[in-house]
């Protein structure tokens, strides 16, 4: 086969597909120098041919020319297959670029644990080697190893109320992922971002996690501590690696919680380290270095006024959604969901929902927790375990003040005095309607 391809090429030396086949065969046959020669020939005739570049890097890797391989891989970082990525990581190790190698390897392990490599495991993760982490093992997800990944264990059915938010996410995130061909046919790019904002405890983080469970795509979450790490400079390269991991696994949802930590307040912006992080984030989001096609970005904040306005430009977070405190019907649903697996009598949810105006989802969670504590104390006295009742829950609600009003106090000032381009009209409408 190799011989006949060589012969064919003497007759038609510029036939690229033919030459690529020969190069690939030589590579598979472990004739690395010859394969490299053929890939170079392809590149002379077709500058920038990506498959040839990767083939050449593979040969360099096998021939022990790690720095040459690194140059190629670095350039094509966002497009690497898992196998190329693994070779790239090994090259970085040989080049003593351990920080970058560790970051990439951890990202790869989270998404593709089957790609585990004994040598790299030993170097980065498990002293003395050991089996690859099992994604279905709950303990694994509690370790730092899972870095920026979270295991989605809820879906929309667990989220009470929030109908409008669910619809927006379905329209902008779930449907594009499930029908990419449709969106392509209409020339609509799949990507971009949604920013969720509102009082704390009203389900922003919760619904983002549920989005992950709702779709069968990869989900990467960057929390506050990751952002701060980047800011302080503990992990400069992390941001780029997080985005690259998302791109490599498109379609993928990238969630940035407490994005205001990234935006900081206007006074903080003068700090150049922060400015640098923001700029890096924006250029990653704009896809300056690599295409973000198929990467959907979801962010949440309690303090939208602290989010740099540059985040809202078209193509960035161009959809901004207010997540209000749950209304009565939503509280009814949330309470049902919170009590679903608890020993409870027939509960009058209507009555409870009516008795808890201004309570956030987190407040309702607190009410249920208090109620359970009360019950436990009681049962220790009586020696009997009794189910939660409507009366118990109403009593618990009296012990916990709703937390959303305070947020509206702050929000009102921003909405009234710095509401350029009507960003916060939803807040004003809400305040008016509920006479806060
Ligand atoms: N719509 C909801 N349905 C069910 N539980 C909710 C809902 N909203 C909030 N909760 C509960 O309140 C907790 C806090 O919500 P969270 O999403 O962290 O709020 P936020 O991110 O808006 O500050 C959640 O972990 C969940 O237990
Ligand atoms: Mg949150």
Image (spheres, grey):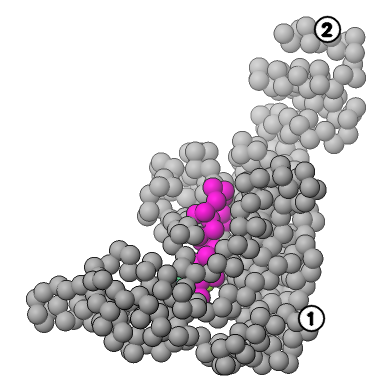
Q: Which residue is mark 2?
A: 7
Nearer the camera: disc 2 or disc 1: 1
* Residue at the image point whose x is 53% and y is 69% from the top: 162
Q: Is residue 300 visible?
A: yes
Vertical position of residue 296 compared to residue 384: above or below: above
Residue 122 shown in magenta: no
Task: State the image coordinates of residue 408 (x, y, percent, origin top left).
Answer: 58, 88
Label 2 near ligand 2 (CB < 8 Å): no
Tag 2 secondary structure = helix
Q: Is residue 239 visible?
A: no
Q: Quadrant of the N terminus?
A: top right
Task: State the image coordinates of residue 11 (x, y, percent, origin top left).
Answer: 90, 9
* Residue at the image point whose x is 30% and y is 63% from the top: 341
Q: Quadrant of the C terminus?
A: bottom right
Could you classify mark 2 by the number of other residues whose Cα lies within 10 Å: few (under 14), some (14-19), or many (20 or more)?
few
Task: State the image coordinates of residue 304 (x, y, percent, origin top left).
Answer: 66, 79
Residue 219 shown in magenta: yes
Task: State the image coordinates of residue 210 (x, y, percent, origin top left).
Answer: 50, 60
Report the label total.
2
* Residue at the image point whose x is 68% and y is 71% from the top: 320
- Marks 2 and 1 sit apart, C-alpha to C-alpha, by 69 Å
Q: Which residue is mark 1?
A: 421
Task: State which region is magenta.
Answer: 202-220
Horizontal placement of 104 versus 154: left or right?
Answer: right
């Amino acid at each position: 086969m190799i011989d006949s391809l060589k012969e064919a090429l003497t007759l038609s030396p510029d036939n690229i597909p033919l030459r690529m086949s020969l190069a690939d065969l030589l590579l598979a046959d472990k004739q690395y120098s010859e394969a490299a020669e053929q890939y170079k020939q392809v590149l002379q005739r077709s500058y920038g041919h990506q498959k040839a570049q990767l083939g050449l890097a593979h040969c360099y890797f096998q021939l022990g020319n790690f720095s040459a391989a690194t140059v190629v891989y670095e350039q094509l970082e966002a497009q690497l297959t898992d196998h190329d990525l693994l070779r790239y990581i090994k090259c970085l190790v040989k080049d003593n670029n351990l920080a970058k190698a560790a970051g990439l390897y951890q990202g790869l392990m989270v998404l593709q644990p089957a790609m585990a490599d004994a040598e790299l495991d030993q170097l980065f993760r498990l002293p003395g080697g050991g089996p690859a982490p099992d994604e279905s093992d709950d303990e694994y997800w509690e370790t730092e190893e899972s870095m920026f990944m979270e295991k989605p264990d809820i879906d929309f059915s667990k989220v009470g109320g929030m109908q409008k938010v669910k619809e927006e996410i379905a329209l902008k995130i779930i449907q594009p992922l499930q029908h990419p061909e449709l969106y392509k046919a209409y020339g609509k790019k799949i990507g971009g971002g949604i920013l969720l904002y509102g009082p704390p405890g009203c389900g922003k983080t919760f619904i983002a996690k549920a989005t992950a469970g709702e779709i069968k795509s990869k989900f990467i979450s960057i929390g506050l501590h990751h952002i701060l790490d980047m800011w302080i400079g503990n992990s400069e390269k992390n941001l780029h690696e997080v985005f690259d991991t998302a791109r490599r696994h498109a379609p993928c949802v990238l969630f940035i919680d407490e994005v205001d930590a990234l935006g900081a307040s206007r006074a903080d912006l003068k700090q150049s380290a922060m400015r640098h992080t923001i700029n890096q984030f924006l250029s990653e989001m704009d896809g300056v270095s690599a295409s973000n096609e198929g990467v959907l970005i979801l962010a949440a904040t309690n303090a939208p006024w602290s989010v740099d306005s540059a985040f809202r430009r078209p193509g960035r977070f161009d959809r901004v959604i207010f997540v209000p405190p749950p209304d009565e019907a939503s509280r009814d649903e949330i309470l049902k969901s919170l009590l679903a697996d608890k020993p409870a009598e027939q509960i009058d949810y209507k009555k409870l929902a009516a008795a808890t105006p201004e309570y956030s989802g987190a407040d309702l969670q607190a009410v249920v927790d208090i109620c359970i504590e009360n019950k436990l104390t009681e049962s220790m006295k009586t020696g009997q375990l009794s189910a939660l009742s409507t009366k118990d829950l109403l009593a618990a609600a009296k012990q916990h003040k709703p937390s959303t009003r305070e947020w509206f106090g702050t929000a009102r000032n921003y909405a009234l005095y710095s509401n350029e381009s009507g960003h916060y009209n939803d807040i004003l409408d809400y305040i008016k309607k509920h006479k806060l």
